[in-house]
Amino acid sequence: MDTPDPRLADGRQSPTAAAVQRGVCRLLRASGFATVTELVLATGRRVDVIALNDKGDIWIVEIKSSLADLRADRKWPEYWEYCDRLFFAVPDDFPMETLPGEAGHIVADGFGADIVRHIDEQRLAAARRKAVTLRFARAAALRLHGLHDPHADGLEQPGFYEPGKPFQA
Amino acid sequence: MDTPDPRLADGRQSPTAAAVQRGVCRLLRASGFATVTELVLATGRRVDVIALNDKGDIWIVEIKSSLADLRADRKWPEYWEYCDRLFFAVPDDFPMETLPGEAGHIVADGFGADIVRHIDEQRLAAARRKAVTLRFARAAALRLHGLHDPHADGLEQPGFYEPGKPFQA
């Protein structure tokens, strides 16, 4: 966790952002939330962390690894349309006074995180909650399936599907 | 995929059941469904495969690797309370005439599967659909998180959480 780097051009995270993400997901899990990272919303925007508890509450956490990263993002208020609570999560050397007050604030490293500024709920409408929950569910399950069966997406390849061939684990 | 074995006592699957599960999940994915295996329902019963498409439809597939496996299960009709469509999935040497007509039938091996008997929908009520979707979503996300961060569940261990320690990827 040295100098904060911007997101890499190919969409991979900086080491700082990866560490913050890990700590955030641990905090959320300990708070009763299941998390999905890098979820693409209906708008095409990709949220860093989205979380769902057993009451169906949805939180979104947007990771900012540097001040430049925060300043480059003018669209973050849109995330309020997809969650009940919105947070920024930053590393501990981030200039906290620059974070907008219209979201909660989380400080995180690769081992854990703390909510340092809470934010009131703005409850989603039922139809939107249903749509976001469905998107969350399918993304998590499809990724998990892809890890268990890396060929699951390749069935359109000619010759791959061979029903008569014996199963090999 | 030799002689069908019963489920192992520790809950692990026989090779036949594992092959059928893999083929079923591929079929469902190709049909627009995301799948979760071994999902524990509110009743405590564990469904072999549960699937969710982008319209929110929920299907359950119960795997039977042998006739003994089918005959040992008297509670399968309860699954209709948790899905819109219920199927049995079996290997291709299964005596198909013994399968109950109150569910669809799928024949599968480790490479793919086919629906050989369709079944009409019995649509879930909205509240039940919401509850099952939430359970599906959280199970998938928690498992995926556990694979990405195997220590995420161990944070209660003394000394594990060390905020001052530098992050190591």
Image (spheres, coloured by chain):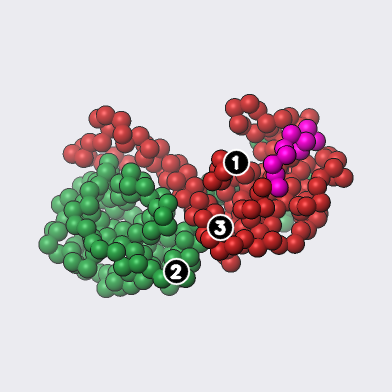
Chain colours: A green, B red
- The chain under label 2 reads A
Q: Which numbered circle lies on residue B128?
A: 3
Q: Quadrant of the N terminus of chain B?
A: top right
Task: Give the CA separation, mark 2 to mark 3.
Answer: 15 Å
| x and y, in percent, of residue B97 in the image | 87, 45
Same chain for the residues at labels 3 and 1, yes or no?
yes
Q: Amino acid at mark 2?
A: Ala
Give above or below for B147 relative to B29. above
Taking the spot 82% from the left edge, 40% from the top edge, the residue there is B94
Q: Decide if residue B5 is in sight here.
A: yes
Residue, disc 1? B45
In the picture provided, is B3 more to the left or to the right than A130? Answer: right
Task: Give the CA separation, mark 1 to mark 2.
Answer: 29 Å
Q: Which residues are magenta?
A: B65-77
In the picture provided, is B41 more to the left or to the right than A51? Answer: right
Taking the spot 73% from the left edge, 29% from the top edge, the residue there is B5
Q: Nearer the viewer, residue A121 or A60?
A: A121
Q: Amino acid at mark 1?
A: Arg
Q: Dot 2, crowdedness within 10 Å: few (<14), some or many (≥20)?
A: few
Taking the spot 33% from the left edge, 72% from the top edge, the residue there is A78
Q: Any magenta on residue B156? A: no
Same chain for the residues at labels 1 and 2, yes or no?
no
Q: Decide if residue A37 is in sight here.
A: no
Q: Nearer the viewer, residue A36 or B119?
A: B119
| x and y, in percent, of residue A95 in the image | 13, 58
